[in-house]
Amino acid sequence: MSENSAAFEAEAAEGEEVAVKPVVAVVGRPNVGKSSLVNRVIGRREAVVEDVPGVTRDRVAYDASWQGRAFTLVDTGGWETGAEGLAAMVARQAEYAAQTADVILFVVDATVGITDADAAVTRVLRSTRRPVVLAANKVDGELQEADALVLWNLGVGEPYPISALHGRGTGDLLDAVVAAFPEQADARAAAEEEGPRRIALVGRPNVGKSSLLNRLAGEDRVVVDSVAGTTRDAVDELIDLGGITWKFIDTAGIRRRFRQLQGADYYATVRTSAALERAEVAVVLMDVSEPLAEQDIRVVEQVVESGRALVLAFNKWDTLDEDRRYYLEKEIDRQLSRVSWAPRVNISAKTGRHVEKLVPAIETGLAGWDTRVPTGRLNSWLKELIAATPPPVRGGKQPKILFATQADTRPPHFVLFTTGFLEDNYRRFVERRLREEFGFEGTPVKVSMRIREKKGGTRASKGSVRKDWRR
């Protein structure tokens, strides 16, 4: 045993904390410039570089830093799925590095475009559940940036155009890598990711959230009182429903003007926002014995803005007479028309009426939230849609939609690549037809628009991106 190893074990035995730096694995198929990028990041020529595929075979770790953040950079051999012999052993080393890293830096040759090997590696990377930063290498100038944009079709996020050889664009790339580093709270988040699906019960104060949680649990697990604001902490409860274990987060009621609140009510509102961040789907509970209030609408908007799946639950439905039901339906159609895609359940937390319908509604919302549309199918559908209903003329010119890709899920995020600005009405039309064709019931849909500049090529600048939450 070396002196360093002995010292390390001695420190561990004494219970001292040992700081662990984030690990960044550099992966990609052979000869895309991984080792060149490693040398660029560490600032010296340590990784062997040669214009021959397969020079790097083992995982090699280097100390690196950017903007004061230290991390471990792991160079890997060329990753080819389906390889045999030595190449298969190299690929296994690269896959292991990706599975054990905190962030994956996926390097692709932008001048070649997406190969079958790149697409195969992408499928493996998604299964690791690690953040992926996509480096579009060998982009030596603005004329080649259009090549990088095609890599959106890999579906792992925004491609960062770089030149590992010349250093072009590597600063923005490293900014993205550092931004993806896990925080201390990420250990709990990772555990939750593998555990039961997480549901936040939200709504304005005193609409019956705690009563509903107790009804679902079959026992009194949280305090219920007619005084608004009894619940002030976010309470996690594991509850078995329909043979499945769910994690319910009962929250304090959301108030609209939370900046004016004092003391405990203020912190209750902050905790509710934190609960939404931890949840995957939100059940918004509304008391139908009263007219829909501004606070109800605000709660729904907050869920949509957080990007969580959404279920609308109308409580005390059994107390309504025919007249009140008629006018309530009118209120719902008028005030909640922007979330007409959300599953709806009419329940009674007090009597248990129809609470069993919550689970199918939640499952529907999560299914839409998780949905990914294959790029080929998406663009075939989009081509037919544009042929039937092209974008309207704007400023004497008709913008064209070149292609589209789904950049992310949870919630679904689509990027439209265009030659000009698309009017709001047409984007809403595209969003409606997306829902009709592919579902997405119970989830917000995020739509980004990337406009190609006139001077030969596209610029992936922040100013050219339009992002909208379609509600």
Image: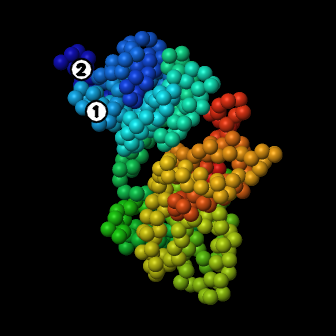
Q: Earlier in the sequence, mark 1 or mark 2?
A: 2
Please name the residue that numbered disc 1 is placed on.
Answer: 83
Question: Vertical placement of 64 versus 253: above or below?
Answer: above
Residue at the location (37% across, 65% down)? Answer: 239
The colour scheme used to paint the residues is rainbow
Estimate the x, y position of residue 198 in percent, counting from the top left: 43, 57
Residue at the location (37% across, 25% down)? Answer: 30
Q: Is residue 301 left or right of residue 115?
A: right
Q: In this view, does 234 lie to the left or right of 50?
A: right
Quarter of the image for residue 46 reads: top left
Mark pair 1, 2: CA separation: 36 Å
Question: Vertical placement of 94 versus 249: above or below?
Answer: above
Give the amino acid at mark 1: Ala
Residue at the far left: name it. Answer: 1
Quarter of the image for residue 150 reads: top right
Quarter of the image for residue 4 reads: top left
Quarter holding the C terminus is: bottom right
Residue at the location (53% across, 84% down)? Answer: 318
Give SS at disc 1: loop
Quarter holding the N terminus is: top left
Give the amino acid at mark 2: Ser
Estimate the x, y position of residue 463 in percent, counting from the top left: 69, 36
Residue 5 tag number: 2
Q: Residues within 10 Å of mark 2 (few under 14, many from 20)?
A: few
Q: Nearer the viewer, residue 209 or 10?
A: 209
Q: Which of 326 and 55 is in front in this view?
A: 55
Estimate the x, y position of residue 426 in percent, counting from the top left: 70, 55
Please tell me whether mark 1 or mark 2 is closer to you in this view: 1
Q: Residues within 10 Å of mark 1 (few under 14, many from 20)?
A: few
Give SS at disc 2: helix
Q: Nearer the viewer, residue 380 or 68?
A: 380
